[in-house]
Image (cartoon, grey):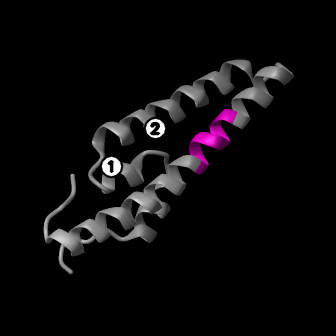
Amino acid sequence: MPGQKSSGVAVLLSFFLSGLGQIYNGELAKGLLLLFASIGLSVFLFFLWWTCAGLVLGSALALVVWIFGMYDAYTRAEQYNQALRATGRPPW
C-alpha cells in the first residue's frame, strides 16, 4: 500500500543514530528527544570517560537508549502500517 513505512529502514536509521527511525516514522518529538538524549549521553561520556563509574553508567544508559530506539522504530513502523491498511490513512 502506498505510504507505508519500512520497518527495516526505521531500524537501520535508528542503528546509525538514535531518533532517526522515529523521525522517519513521523514521530518528530520522540525522535528529537531520543536524538538529544543520545547526544547528551555522548557528552556525558566524553567528560567522564576517565572515571570508572561514569564510564559504566554512561555506557549502560547509552546502550539502553540505543536499543530502545531501534526497537521502538521497528514496532512503531509496524503499527503505522497496520493502521494505514485498516483505515486507509496515517495514524499520526
Residue 15 to residue 89: above or below: above
What residue do we see at 31% from left, 37% from top? 29
Describe the element under mark 1 as helix, strand or loop: helix
Seen in the picture, residue 82 relative to 37 is either above or below; the reply is below
Which residue is disc 2 drawn over? 34
Disc 2 residue type? Leu
- 56 versus 18 height, above or below: above
Q: Residues within 10 Å of mark 2 (few under 14, many from 20)?
A: many
Which residue does the image show at 66% across and 34% down from the upper left?
Answer: 61
In the image, is 42 to the left or to the right of 5?
right
The quarter of the rendered structure image containing the N terminus is bottom left
Question: Which residue sits at x=67%, y=18%?
Answer: 47
* Residue type marked 1: Ile
Q: Is residue 29 left or right of residue 69?
A: left
Residue depicted at x 58% and y 40%: 65
Residue extending farthest to the front is 86
- Counting labels gives 2
Q: Looking at the rendered structure, which numbered label has been put on residue 23?
A: 1
x, y percentage for residue 5?
A: 31, 68
Q: What is the crowding at mark 1: few (fewer than 14 residues within 10 Å), some, or many (at least 20)?
A: many
Q: Is residue 29 left or right of residue 17?
A: left
Q: Overall secondary structure of the magenta stretch?
A: helix
Q: Secondary structure at mark 2?
A: helix
Q: CA distance from mark 1 to mark 2?
A: 10 Å
N-terminal of the two: label 1 or label 2? Answer: 1
